[in-house]
Image: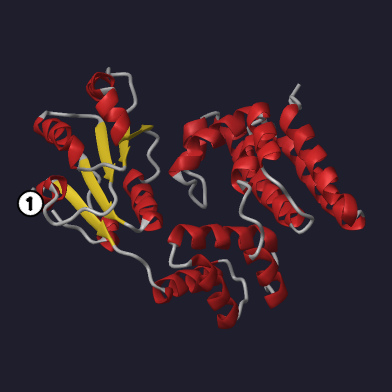
């Protein structure tokens, strides 16, 4: 059954098989998030090659289970007709407690997987098409309106031009701006230019998330593999501050209800499904009082980097290594 992306919200959450295809990776990720819809089910991701190389293990994971096990969500990336027989076999089985989401690239009309999902009413088929500047502009306008950030259409156009029609890139840019403004209600053209031209060679969110998760090896690898300049410092610190505030809010709630899954799934704004596992680790690493100390530390380091502009990279790197490699709850 063919479904338009906006119709997902009206769909009952009782379907097992979903096919998403097309070039719009950002939109497909948003659709996957809507399908999962705050679920606490265990998520497993595969690509086509893994399934072909480890078919037995793949089947065992889907078909095994117990009364006490959480339901599973299986996400299959880069799927083509090469695994059509496997998909068809799974559909023919009486599967329960599993949701299977197939994330494919472009599928021509002659594709067996596409044809199968289009024709059967119990199978959900969602085509995604490339965004254009108009649709991306609407997304940006809605974002800034919801965040109550004042910005000119000229600056929105500047952001859109940077994204080259890529919704995922746009979302990254918008989150970058959100972290940078951190409560400010207006952003200037100069700030926009600085932000959209920041070097993209470092995984900013990945760096901060692993710092909060105290993944020492990952932090060191990211720092060694990427270069920074002084202009990057503030946005890194603002992102760090934003993530720390989120963890503080969640940690306070977690102390009240003692249920980490409930805490994560009831978070507002919702936590993206890809982030849930690392947020769970972060909540187990930080107590509220320690996060408050971290937030004060981030604010102090931002002032220090501004006063010592020439040494800002060293100051920032030392701070990240200190907070990411020390067991501060003991």
Relative to residue 8, is residue 131 drawn left or right? right
Q: Residue at x 50, y 33 (%)?
A: 277
Relative to residue 318, is residue 20 drawn left or right? left
Q: Residue at x 69, y 32 (%)?
A: 220
The x, y position of residue 233, in whole percent, is: 76, 53
Q: Quarter of the image for the C terminus: give it.
A: top right
Colour convention: secondary structure
Among the 4 quarters of the image, the one containing residue 214: top right
Q: Residues within 10 Å of mark 1 (few under 14, many from 20)?
A: few
Nearest the viewer among 193 and 226 is 226
Q: Residue at x 13, y 57 (%)?
A: 109
The x, y position of residue 162, in whole percent, is: 54, 68
The x, y position of residue 159, in whole percent, is: 56, 71
Nearest the viewer among 147 and 76 is 76
Residue located beneath label 1 in the image = 119
Q: How many marks?
A: 1
Relative to residue 46, is residue 295 drawn left or right? right
The x, y position of residue 77, in whole percent, is: 32, 41
- Asked if 288 appears above or below 133 in the picture, the reply is above
For residue 234, say whether it is visible. Answer: yes
Among the 4 quarters of the image, the one containing residue 76: top left
Q: Callout 1: helix, strand or loop?
A: helix
Relative to residue 13, is residue 166 drawn left or right? right
For residue 289, say whether it is visible. Answer: no
């Amino acid at each position: 059954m063919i479904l338009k992306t906006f119709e997902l919200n009206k769909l009952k959450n009782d379907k097992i098989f979903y096919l998403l295809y097309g070039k719009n990776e950002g939109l497909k990720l948003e659709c996957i998030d809507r399908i999962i819809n705050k679920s606490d089910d265990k998520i497993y991701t595969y690509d086509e090659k893994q399934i072909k190389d480890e078919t037995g293990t793949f089947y065992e994971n889907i078909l095994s289970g117990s009364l006490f096990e959480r339901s599973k969500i299986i996400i299959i990336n880069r799927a083509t007709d090469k695994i059509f027989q496997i998909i068809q076999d799974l559909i023919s089985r009486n599967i329960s407690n599993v949701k299977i989401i197939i994330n494919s690239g472009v599928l021509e009309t002659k594709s067996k997987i596409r044809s199968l999902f289009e024709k059967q009413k119990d199978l959900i088929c969602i085509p995604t098409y490339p965004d254009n500047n108009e649709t991306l502009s609407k997304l940006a306008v809605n974002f800034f309106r919801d965040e109550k950030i004042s910005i000119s259409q000229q600056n929105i156009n500047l952001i859109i031009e940077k994204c080259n029609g890529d919704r995922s890139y746009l979302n990254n840019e918008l989150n970058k701006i959100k972290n940078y403004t951190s409560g400010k209600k207006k952003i200037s053209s100069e700030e926009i230019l600085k932000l959209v031209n920041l070097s993209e060679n470092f995984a900013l969110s990945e760096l901060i998330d692993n710092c909060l998760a105290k993944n020492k090896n990952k932090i060191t690898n990211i720092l060694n593999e990427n270069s920074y300049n002084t202009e990057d410092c503030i946005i890194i610190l603002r992102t760090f501050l934003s993530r720390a505030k989120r963890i503080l809010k969640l940690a306070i709630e977690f102390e009240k209800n003692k249920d980490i899954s409930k805490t994560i799934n009831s978070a507002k704004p919702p936590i993206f499904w890809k982030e849930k596992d690392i947020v769970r680790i972060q909540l187990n690493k930080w107590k509220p009082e320690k996060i408050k100390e971290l937030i004060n530390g981030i604010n102090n380091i931002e002032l220090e980097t501004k006063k010592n502009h020439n040494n800002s990279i060293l100051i920032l790197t030392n701070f990240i290594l200190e907070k990411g490699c020390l067991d501060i709850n003991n």
